[in-house]
Image (cartoon, rainbow, N blue to C red):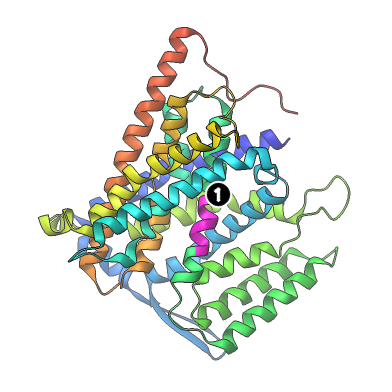
Amino acid sequence: MARKTTLEFLRTEAGSGVVLALAATLAIILANSPWAAGYFSLIKHPLTFQAGDIEVTKPVLKWIKDGLMTIFFFVVGLEIKYEVLRGELSNPRKLALPVLGAVGGMVVPALIYLALNGGPGGAVDGWPVPVATDIAFALAALAIAGPRLPLSLRTFLLTLAIADDLGAVVLIATLFTDHIDLVALAGAGVMLALMVLAARWQRAPYAVFAILTFGVWAFTLESGVNPSIAGVVAAMAIPIDPRRPGETGMLKTMMQSLHPYVAYGVMPIFAFAAAGFSFSELSAENLFSPVALGVAAGLFVGKQIGVLGASAVAIRLGLARRPTDASWLELYGCAVLCGVGFTMSLFIGALAFDADNPTAQSAVRLGVIGGSILAAALGMAALAWSQVQRDRSGTAVDPQPATHH
């Protein structure tokens, strides 16, 4: 059953990657069409949220980042909790390789970015941008390039990306909080405490958790802490154990129910709103700025060196094993695909640089899109070549067996 759940998750992520690519492409087309003014007017249009005495006005793009993307991070939090308690992250032997690979894949890109932005004209604040991996895009690329490669590769890439997401959440929480309203933060704490108490109530309706999660988000939004943290923290309070023997736990039910909406709704909407940029921004100043080069090099060069290097050291030292039936070329291909940062990198980039600084925002978009495209192309080429070699030698592996245990 666990294997079946993993395969269903992977299929959803792979399909989502294609939708994400289409949404981003549409955004870029519109941003360079006769309807460009309408596109930019839409994502900058102000909207007001009011709940009691709380009134907040933000542009549409900001609401997507602070509102819809909180749902994305809620699902990420559910996935992290499930994997830590029941899944791949609960097994130390399986955990070592993707976690160490994730650490290497965060440290090396950050160092490369800092090396390129340490001098005049650089912006060191953007170092977290290339540390992220986009699960949907990476898994979609793997599914397209190597549909008959071992399932262990997909599990490795998925687990590494989840560990990477956890690291990104920590960075968001610690680096991107400008001010803190202690009263509002206390309100979020009260809502969270009520969620923990509700988790002890065996028959607590799902609506109770939905209302309290909304409360955690609303108070966090007012507190000055990035609302994405509210999604992750609230997810940790969702009970994982089933209410009765034979039932599916609330956490798993929520995760499976929300995941398709996030994969095919929330993330493509964010990609559509965040990826659009005008070709008029493709000046030499933007293309070769330290920010754009740092982000692109961090994703394309840093990720593959960090992930493969850390993984190789762990395997050579006996701390971990290579994914079952996978070759070094296939492990390399997955390491390169980790450089597809896209959604998470765009999200962090929007936090790292002031929205009123269009030059920096354009440089981030160029770096993220350029680095992600290069990583996807090389990673898919390596995996496709390995797939061809397997097919020629007759050693292809069926990643989706007919029976599940």
Nearer to the camera, 243 or 326: 326
Query: Residue 281 placed where, x, y %?
Result: 16, 59
Quarter of the image holding residue 403? top right
**Circle 1: element type:** helix
Q: Quadrant of the N terminus?
A: top right
- At label 1, which amino acid type do we have? Ile
Asked if residue 27 shows in the view, the reply is: no
- Left-right relation of 90 to 152: right
Q: Please report the residue visible at 42 percent of the width from the left and 14 percent of the height from the top.
A: 389
Query: Residue 140 placed where, x, y %?
Result: 45, 37
Query: Residue 150 placed where, x, y %?
Result: 55, 25
- Left-right relation of 215 to 367: right
On the image, numbered disc 1 is attached to which residue? Answer: 162
Nearer to the camera, 356 or 120: 120
Nearer to the camera, 279 or 189: 189
**Overall secondary structure of the magenta section:** helix
Q: Is residue 379 above or below residue 129?
A: above
Q: Residue furthest left?
A: 284
Q: Please report the residue visible at 78 percent of the width from the left and 48 percent of the height from the top.
A: 248
- Left-right relation of 344 to 219: left
- Count neighbours of disc 1 (C-alpha within 10 A) and say few if under 14, some if 14 to 19, many if 20 or more: many
Query: Residue 57 placed where, x, y %?
Result: 41, 81
Q: Please report the residue visible at 62 percent of the width from the left and 79 percent of the height from the top.
A: 188
Q: Magenta stretch: residue 164 in it?
A: yes
Looking at the rendering, the stretch of residues picked out in magenta corresponds to: 162-170
Q: Magenta stretch: residue 127 in it?
A: no
Q: Quadrant of the C terminus?
A: top right
Q: Residue furthest right?
A: 245
